[in-house]
């Protein structure tokens, strides 16, 4: 267990550094979107391309793993919406906040934290299954939750418009494209020219530390800037419960579904299953708070869930690694 903590500690320490830098105004809040832009559009796509290009195509096209993980993500969305909607003290939770509560419960921080952390713990073979989970979350889970969030609108075509917005966001998101290009390079045994490869490597190497630092800064910023659409509740409301769903219910659900798939004779690699169980045990994705802000949800509630899940994940994730490896 101590050896696992020694590996995971630096990752969470970088999150804390970003949090403290923003809280103490060492990092101006206005600079945080710039960090996000660097990670999202430059460093992280290069890291995912590099992993995709070096991962056998069969791992990236693992249909059994994709279906197991996706089914659990959809169950997490359904359960969180059902268990939180109309149960918030001080007033009902509408579709908008219920949907983003579900997204923050089902969407792990795989891109910014999971891929580099799992590769450090389990080796480069962990990249393929983690990328499979990223595809499911970016393409389907987030699109579904954004569509559900529009059901509050008076416009009867609100959900359809949300689906179009979600599709537009998916198309303009560089992460799926970088994975696709990396997979194509892997299939064609293609290598970039040496100067381009060196540039990609430099950006990819920067992805992990800058992304983790940015997670902390984003969490601090979400706490420091008031939410325009905060729910009228006392205390933490349903925040601890949703964080518990993310850190405990989600990985247990993926493990159980994986075991049932193995018993049913599905061609599911036990190592790949272990990786996606650990993916599910990751804290909530930090970019959900930005999506919540964009769609006028209660960003304070979402940010608190992300903060609690990130703070608690240091121990729960390490414990999950110890149990599964």
Image (cartoon, helix red, strand yellow):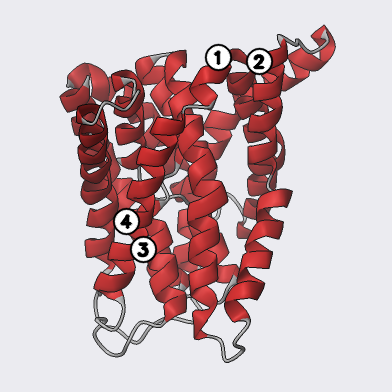
From the viewer's perspective, tell me whether residue 161 is left or right of residue 101.
Answer: right
Label 3: how many Cα within 10 Å (few below 14, some 14–19, many 20+): some
Question: Residue 149, relative to residue 269: is it above or below?
Answer: below
Q: Position of residue 139 (x, y in %)?
A: 57, 49
Q: Secondary structure at mark 3?
A: helix
Report which quarter residue 267 is drawn in.
Answer: top left
Of label 2 and label 3, which has the lower sequence position?
Answer: 2
Find residue 277 and name its label.
Answer: none
Find residue 75 and name its label.
Answer: 4
Give me the C-alpha separation between circle 4 and circle 2. Answer: 33 Å
Of label 4 and label 2, which has the lower sequence position?
Answer: 4
Of label 1 and label 3, which has the lower sequence position?
Answer: 1
**Residue at the spot x=39%, y=32% of the render?**
65
Q: Position of residue 293 (x, y in %)?
A: 56, 69
Quickly name the residue at label 1.
56
Disc nearest the viewer among 4 and 3 = 4
Disc count in the image? 4
Label 1: how many Cα within 10 Å (few below 14, some 14–19, many 20+): some
Find residue 304 and name its label.
Answer: 3
Find residue 186 and name its label.
Answer: 2
Q: Are marks 2 and 1 in contact (CB under 8 Å)?
A: yes
Of label 4 and label 1, which has the lower sequence position?
Answer: 1
Give me the C-alpha separation between circle 2 and circle 1. Answer: 7 Å
Q: What is the quadrant of the N terminus in the image?
A: top left
Q: Position of residue 58 (x, y in %)?
A: 52, 19
Question: Residue 322, relative to residue 284: is it above or below?
Answer: above
Disc nearest the viewer among 1 and 3 = 1
**Residue at the spot x=42%, y=75% of the render?**
97
């Amino acid at each position: 267990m101590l050896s696992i903590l020694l590996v995971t500690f630096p990752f969470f320490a970088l999150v804390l550094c970003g949090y403290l830098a923003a809280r103490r105004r060492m990092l101006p809040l206005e600079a945080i979107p710039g960090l996000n832009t660097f990670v999202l559009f430059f460093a992280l796509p290069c890291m995912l391309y590099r992993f995709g290009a070096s991962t056998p195509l069969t791992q990236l096209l693992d249909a059994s793993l994709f279906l197991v993980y996706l089914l659990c993500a959809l169950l997490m969305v359904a359960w969180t919406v059902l268990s939180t909607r109309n149960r918030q003290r001080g007033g009902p939770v509408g579709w908008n906040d219920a949907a983003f509560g579900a997204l923050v419960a089902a969407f792990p921080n795989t891109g910014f934290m999971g891929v580099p952390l799992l590769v450090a713990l389990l080796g480069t073979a962990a990249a393929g299954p983690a990328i499979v989970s990223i595809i499911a979350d970016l393409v389907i889970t987030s699109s579904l939750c954004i569509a559900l969030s529009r059901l509050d609108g008076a416009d009867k075509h609100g959900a359809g418009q949300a689906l179009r917005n979600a599709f537009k966001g998916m198309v303009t998101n560089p992460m799926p494209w970088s994975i696709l290009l990396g997979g194509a390079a892997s299939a064609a045994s293609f290598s970039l020219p040496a100067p381009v490869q060196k540039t990609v490597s430099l950006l990819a190497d920067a992805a992990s530390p800058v992304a983790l630092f940015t997670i902390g800064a984003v969490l601090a910023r979400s706490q420091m800037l008031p939410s325009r659409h905060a729910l009228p509740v006392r205390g933490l409301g349903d925040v601890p419960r949703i964080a518990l769903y993310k850190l405990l219910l989600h990985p247990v659900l993926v493990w159980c579904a994986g075991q049932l798939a193995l018993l049913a004779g599905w061609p599911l690699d036990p190592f790949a299953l272990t990786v996606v169980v650990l993916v599910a045990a990751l804290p909530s994705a930090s970019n959900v708070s930005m999506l919540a802000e964009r769609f006028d949800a209660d960003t304070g509630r979402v940010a608190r869930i992300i903060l609690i899940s990130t703070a608690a994940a240091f121990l729960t994730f390490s414990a999950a690694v110890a149990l599964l490896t």
